[in-house]
Amino acid sequence: MEIKSKEVQVQKSASDLCDFLSNVKNFEQLMPENTSKFELINDNSFVFALKGMPEIALEVKEVNSPNSVVLGAMSDKLPFTLTGDVTPIDENTSKAQLRFEGDFNPMMKMMIKGPITKFLETLATNLEKC
């Protein structure tokens, strides 16, 4: 299952945007308003929860500056990745698109597709404002 956010323009260089996305502290400002929990676990991971949803722990798995940052679930129960794909426009501007990928059964896909799509759109919209 793959879900992509809209592509957004960010007023940061591709390298700066990759640095921003690879610093997990910055995800707190990207989270939706209905976030009920956000805690740093360490320099490379954090846990968050949206109201009515279970907690999810993410960690930085891979940084390919200035092209992408890959975060992955720390739990094997819901194996997925969240990738920030970055494309430079000029030296001070870049484009970003968030991509969620996971292997889920058909019932789980039906349950999470809507909330994940909305979540990605919120992250992308908030990233555009950074």
Image (tube, rainbow, N blue to C red):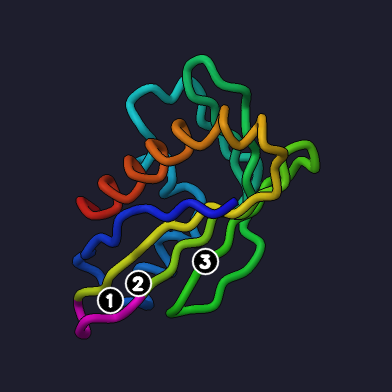
Q: Which residue is mark 1?
A: 13
| Amino acid beneath label 1 | Ser
Q: In the image, what residue occupies the spot 54% across and 54% down?
A: 2
Q: Which residue is mark 3?
A: 69
Q: Which residue is mark 2?
A: 16
Label 1–label 2 contact, CB within 8 A: yes
Label 1–label 3 contact, CB within 8 A: no
Q: In the image, what residue occupies the spot 48% across and 72% down?
A: 68
SS at circle 1: loop
| Amino acid beneath label 2 | Asp
Residue 91 horizontal side relative to residue 4, left or right: left
- Picture layout, residue 119 above or below residue 84: above
SS at circle 2: helix
Does residue 38 belong to the magenta stretch?
no
Distance, label 1 to label 3, CA atoms, is: 14 Å
Residue 14 coordinates in the image, percent (x, y): 34, 76
Residue 115 coordinates in the image, percent (x, y): 46, 31
Residue 89 horizontal side relative to residue 32, left or right: left
Which sits earlier in the primary sequence, circle 3 or circle 2? 2
SS at circle 3: strand
Distance, label 1 to label 2, CA atoms, is: 5 Å
- Which stretch is magenta? 87-92
Residue 52 coordinates in the image, percent (x, y): 52, 15
Residue sitting at the far top: 52
Label 3–label 2 contact, CB within 8 A: no
| Amino acid beneath label 3 | Val
Q: Quadrant of residue 11?
A: bottom left
Which sits earlier in the primary sequence, circle 1 or circle 3? 1
Which circle marks residue 84 in the picture? none
